[in-house]
Amino acid sequence: MSAPTLDRPAAPDEAALQAHFDATIAADKRVEPRDWMPEGYRKGLIRQIAQHAHSEIIGMQPEGDWLLAAPSLRRKAILLAKVQDEAGHGMYLYSAAETLGADRADLTDKLIEGRHKYSSIFNYPTLTYADVGVIGWLVDGAAICNQVPLCRSSYGPYARAMIRVCKEESFHQRQGYELLMTMMRGTDEQRAMVQDAVDRWWWPSLMMFGPPDDDSPNSAQSMAWGIKRHSNDELRQRYVDMSVPQAEALGVTLPDPELRLDPSTGRYRFGQIDWDEFKRVISGNGPANAERIARRRAARDDNAWVIEAATAYAEKHAS
Ligand code: FAQ
């Protein structure tokens, strides 16, 4: 501790602050924005939360492409609500990143300039309306599996944002599954569309959980700090175990000849993920990366006047 002065108590030194932070993590309490935190913790959180926020915002595009072509007013209303929810998730997450000192406009610039990642899954095109159902079932299903444990993340604003996000993701998954159930009760052509969409989205959905544990540079520290609660492979396995019975109930096959129940563990074994494809996609060379970023760039540039107008209005009222 530094020496106290007459009028001010001593500021705790870094070792005492670190000890307090370590004790907070060890006791499984939440770290709040006003608390001291190690620089690595702050940077690691901004990295993950920003990537997560970008994913929600870019993730509006694949389904947004079907808003005008939704087959009925009911389907359009459901899809519109879902896509708007994803925008809301992005906003909560950018706000959580701002509590760590990040600047939202700067985070958006980093996304557009390719300096920040976003989820690999949103770099695949939505070719038919069945893709909307499969995104709800598989992509939102994977998101729930990954994000429910984040409701207990050690950083308070992130954990609290995740509670609401997960509630909304549950609705998203159900609407997707219900859409697919309806199509499976329809014509042969509709059933074929669903199967084709499952064939295209299954493997990319497994990649959402990130690289294998022995190739995941951030996991060890992130788990030690309680940011992540489970490893990438653990959550991926949980997702496979959850999805196989759902696929059976739906009447579709998952495109993996090696998928089978291991009676000794009660868990499903699955085939090798194409990690070269994953690396290509996260380095910007997936089927739709260029299109996704171009659209995000256009949205930022075309709508800049709204931010300028709102800022000018706020300044006028403040003065
Ligand atoms: N795609 O060391 P790790 C949604 C990067 S939201 C792209 O294992 P970490 C809702 C990773 O950032 C979906 N990049 O990293 C929705 C790192 O790069 P860096 C998003 C990936 O952080 C539904 C490098 O690889 N969800 O779907 C991916 O410990 C429908 C090494 O990886 C979240 O963001 C990937 N799949 O674990 C919206 C959840 N995986 O930064 C619309 C929160 C890894 O070192 C429609 N995030 N990378 O250069 C997390 O749980 C974690 O960040 C992981 C990655 C598990 C994604």
Image (cartoon, rainbow, N blue to C red):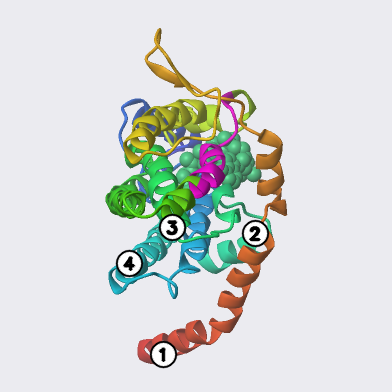
Q: Nearer the viewer, residue 222 or 125?
A: 125
Q: What whole-number distance in Å separates the C-alpha atoms at marks 4 and 3?
A: 10 Å
Counting from the top left corner in percent of width and height, residue 50 is at: 52, 54
Question: Viewer-proximal residue, 304 or 85?
Answer: 85
**Magenta part of the chain:** 196-213
Is residue 137 visible in the rendered image? The answer is yes
Q: Which residue is mark 2?
A: 288
How many numbered badges does the structure rendering display?
A: 4
Upstream in the sequence, badge 4 or badge 1?
A: 4
- Tell me the CA gap for discs 4 and 1: 38 Å
Q: Quadrant of residue 228?
A: top left
**Residue type at mark 1?**
Tyr
Q: What residue is shown with label 4?
A: 75
Q: Which residue is mark 1?
A: 313
Residue labelled with disc 3: 132
Badge 4: few (under 14), some or many (20 or more) residues near its Cα, within 10 Å? some
* Distance from Cα at disc 1 to Cα at disc 3: 39 Å
Q: Secondary structure at mark 4?
A: helix
Q: Does the CB distance between marks 2 and 3 fall below 8 Å?
A: no
Q: Residue at x 45, y 55 (%)?
A: 189
Q: Label 3 amino acid?
A: Val
Q: Secondary structure at mark 3?
A: helix
